[in-house]
Image (cartoon, rainbow, N blue to C red):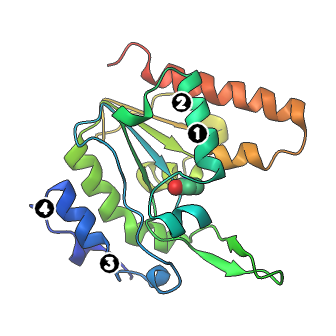
Amino acid sequence: KPTAAPFVQPDATLAELRAAAGACTGCDLYRDATQTVFGEGPDDAPVMLVGEQPGDAEDRQGHPFVGPAGKLLDRALTDAGIDRSRSYVTNAVKHFKWIFTRGHKRLHQTPRTVEVQACAPWLEAEIARVKPQVLILLGATAAKSLLGSGFRVTAQRGVPQPSPLAPRVVATIHPSALLRMANAEQRERAYAAFVADLRAAVADPP
Ligand code: URA
């Protein structure tokens, strides 16, 4: 089975992990990606946010959540009273998985479970270094990576999950899901629910 484990040095600092991840070939996704996109933020951040994988813009720029989903996340974090600059932002998978469309655009592909599992040692190492008080999982990929394949975001979103990973672990939707909603009213309702989940996640810190 593919795994990043041999690249993850047990005693490495966050900065050393970031450098090592740049050379990860633990699964095949590095082949088609421009670069590794590792997590970013203070190494003592009280809040950690985990997305799925870098998108097209993240793959080109080398930073997490800087494209359209990132802009929407920024707005939601502001509306929820969360300071992104004081949060650690990362992804379950560190390389962009995509295919060419016939229009030669790079189309995002959801990573397979084996790929998510292969990359999990990086995510687990980030959590172990940062030790966030609040861990917010954005979407099913991040939630299943850390809480198991049986986890259902739709049923359990916003509900703190008992987990050894952090004092509070909460899953919610992925901001990209909002971008896919064509109906403006539906999108606004879903955005408000997303902000409410984020706000509740950091309320009365455990
Ligand atoms: N979507 C994600 O899940 N992560 C990113 O970094 C960008 C888009």
Above or below: residue 51 compared with residue 48: below
What residue is rendered at 79% in x and 29% in y? 188
**Does the residue at mark 3 contact the one at mark 1 (Cβ under 8 Å)?**
no
Residue at numbered disc 2: 77
Q: Are marks 2 and 3 in contact (CB under 8 Å)?
A: no
Name the residue that disc number 1 marks: 73
Q: Nearer the viewer, residue 143 or 133?
A: 133
- Tell me the quadrant of the picture where the N terminus can be found: bottom left
Q: Could you tell which of marks 2 and 3 lies nearer the N-terminus?
A: 3
Reading the image, the residue beneath label 4 is 12
User: What's the amino acid at mark 3?
Assistant: Cys
Residue pictured at 73% horizontal, 42% vertical: 178
Q: CA distance from mark 2 to mark 3?
A: 30 Å
**Amino acid carrying mark 2 in the image:** Leu
> In x, y percent, where is residue 112?
56, 72
Relative vertical location of residue 37 with respect to residue 154 in this rendering, above or below: below
Q: What amino acid type is highlighted by mark number 4?
A: Ala
Is label 3 or label 1 in front? 1
